[in-house]
């Protein structure tokens, strides 16, 4: 399997920063409509960044379709170009505001998994309401998950984890948080995302949670 990047330095990413100014494009409704209409089970990543997780996941499991929503249009375009270069057909990257798409474009019980990895923590107190895992988005994530569907949330920011996880418990009937042990990496790019790679190679902790939608 060829990963999206073969090698890069430990500090290959900037610190967490707001990307709202880099997004200038409306969602491509045609491409998104085609993706969400697939007959394959769908996994969706909110904030797919440079695309490492989604690309590797699509290569590993051709029986599923993967949608990456990324606010930074530049990242989404570059990740899509790499998919095309690798001839991966069961994934797509789309530049979009994922929170709006989840709220307005994703049908009920249509996803088998939602992934949220290392979202912008919005450090200033007055900006924390802009965090991806807002109360509204948490409720919509539960709505779009199929029974037994999973929410995966990882962050390197303890404050974010300690706020988001209790809100998921309070606002939804998802079971969890279920413990996720730290995965063993077998090579230099064997990490869920670039942010996980940098965090772990610098000896810092990653906080992980998995939630499951129960059968009603």
Image (cartoon, grey):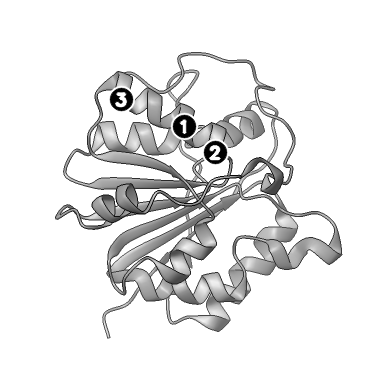
- Mark yes or no: residue 86 visible: yes
Query: Looking at the picture, does residue 169 appear above or below residue 71?
Result: below
Residues tagged 1 and 2 counted as in contact (Cβ below 8 A): yes
Number of the label disc, if any, that sits on residue 216: none
Q: CA distance from mark 2 to mark 3?
A: 17 Å
Mark 1 secondary-structure assignment: helix
Q: Which residue is mark 1?
A: 77
Image quarter hosting the C terminus? bottom left
Looking at the image, residue 113 sits to the left or right of residue 13; the answer is: left
Q: CA distance from mark 1 to mark 3?
A: 11 Å
Residues tagged 1 and 3 counted as in contact (Cβ below 8 A): no
Looking at the image, residue 117 sits to the left or right of residue 58; the answer is: right
Mark 2 secondary-structure assignment: helix
Depth check: give the residue in front, 39 or 178.
Answer: 39
Query: Looking at the picture, does residue 135 appear above or below residue 205?
Result: below
Q: Which residue is mark 3?
A: 84
Question: Along the polypeptide, which appears first: circle 1 or circle 3?
Answer: 1
Residue 2 x %, y %: 33, 18
- Mark yes or no: residue 193 visible: no
Query: Looking at the picture, does residue 207 appear above or below residue 50?
Result: below
Depth check: give the residue in front, 10 or 72.
Answer: 72
Which residue is depicted at the point 55% across and 32% down?
Answer: 74
Looking at the image, residue 149 sits to the left or right of residue 130; the answer is: left
């Amino acid at each position: 399997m060829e990963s999206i990047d073969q090698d890069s330095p430990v500090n290959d990413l900037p610190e967490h920063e707001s990307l709202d100014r880099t997004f200038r494009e409306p969602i491509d409704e045609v491409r998104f409509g085609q993706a969400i209409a697939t007959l394959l089970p769908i996994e969706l990543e909110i904030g797919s960044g440079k695309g490492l997780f989604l690309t590797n996941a699509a290569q590993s499991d051709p029986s599923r379709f993967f949608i990456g929503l990324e606010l930074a249009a530049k990242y989404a375009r570059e990740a899509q170009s790499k998919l095309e270069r690798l001839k991966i057909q069961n994934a797509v990257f789309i530049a979009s505001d994922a929170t709006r798409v989840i709220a307005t474009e994703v049908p009920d019980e249509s996803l088998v998994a939602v992934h949220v990895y290392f979202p912008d923590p919005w450090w200033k107190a007055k900006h924390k309401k802009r965090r991806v895992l807002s109360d509204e988005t948490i409720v919509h994530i539960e709505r779009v998950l199929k029974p037994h569907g999973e929410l995966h949330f990882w962050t390197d920011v303890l404050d974010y984890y300690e706020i988001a996880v209790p809100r998921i418990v309070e606002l939804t009937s998802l079971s969890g948080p279920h413990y996720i042990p730290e995965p063993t990496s077998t090579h230099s790019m064997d990490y869920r995302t670039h942010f996980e790679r940098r965090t772990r190679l610098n000896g810092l902790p990653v906080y992980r949670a998995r939630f499951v939608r129960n059968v009603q």
